[in-house]
Image (tube, grey):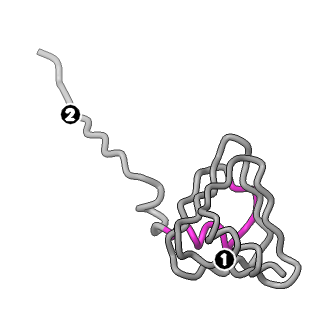
Amino acid sequence: MGSSSLVVLILVSSDLLLGADSQCDVLSRGGYIERTLHITDTVCDVMHTAIIAKDHTLDVKPGVKLRFSPGVMLAINGTLLAKVGTMCRLLSSVL
């Protein structure tokens, strides 16, 4: 009989290895974001320009306030989901 060995493969999410960031943290760091984000934090400070990629969504939950640092922009090439009241607060935060 030949020798045999047992191989065990454990798959771990990269979020667990790196420490899972909140969805707000991802948006705040900015850059080209190729994932759907659901922003639930009461206040989310966007520190760097962010671009939501095509085929992805920025979902701003009711009651969330997005605050932008001076000169910071948000571009949505995908989909923006926000209630009208939330959108009004979002736009007034930019002005």
Query: Residue 4 — which label?
Result: none
- Residue ranking furthest to the top: 1
Q: Residue flagged by tag 2: what amino acid is it?
A: Leu
The stretch of residues the image draws in magenta is 21-33
Q: Is residue 11 above or below residue 33?
A: above
Q: Nearer the viewer, residue 64 or 46?
A: 64
Residue 25: in magenta span: yes
Going 72% across and 54% down the picture, which residue do you hit?
Answer: 52
Tell me what residue is drawn at x 42 percent, y 52 percent: 13
Q: Quadrant of the C terminus?
A: bottom right
Residue count near mark 1 (Cα–Cα under 10 Å), binned few <14, some 14–19, many ≥20: many
The residue closer to the viewer here, 44 or 84, is 84
Q: 9 or 75, which lies in front?
A: 75
Quarter of the image with the N terminus is: top left
The percent coordinates of residue 76 (x first, y second) are: 76, 54
> Total label count?
2
Residue at the far right in the pictured view = 71
As drawn, is 52 to the left or to the right of 95? left
Report the disc number at residue 6: 2
Give SS at disc 2: loop
**Placement of 18 over or under 41, stated as above or below:** above
Q: Where in the figure is residue 11, as x and y percent of width and height? A: 36, 45
* Secondary structure beneath label 1: strand
Q: Nearer the viewer, residue 10 or 72?
A: 72
Q: Earlier in the sequence, mark 1 or mark 2?
A: 2
Distance CA(mark 1)–CA(mark 2):
51 Å
Picture quadrant where residue 91 is located: bottom right
Q: Quadrant of residue 37?
A: bottom right
Question: In this image, 72 relative to 53: left or right?
Answer: right
- Mark 2, Cα crowd under 10 Å, few <14 / some 14-19 / many 20+, is few
In the rendered image, which residue does mark 1 sit on?
66
Q: Nearer the viewer, mark 1 or mark 2?
A: 1
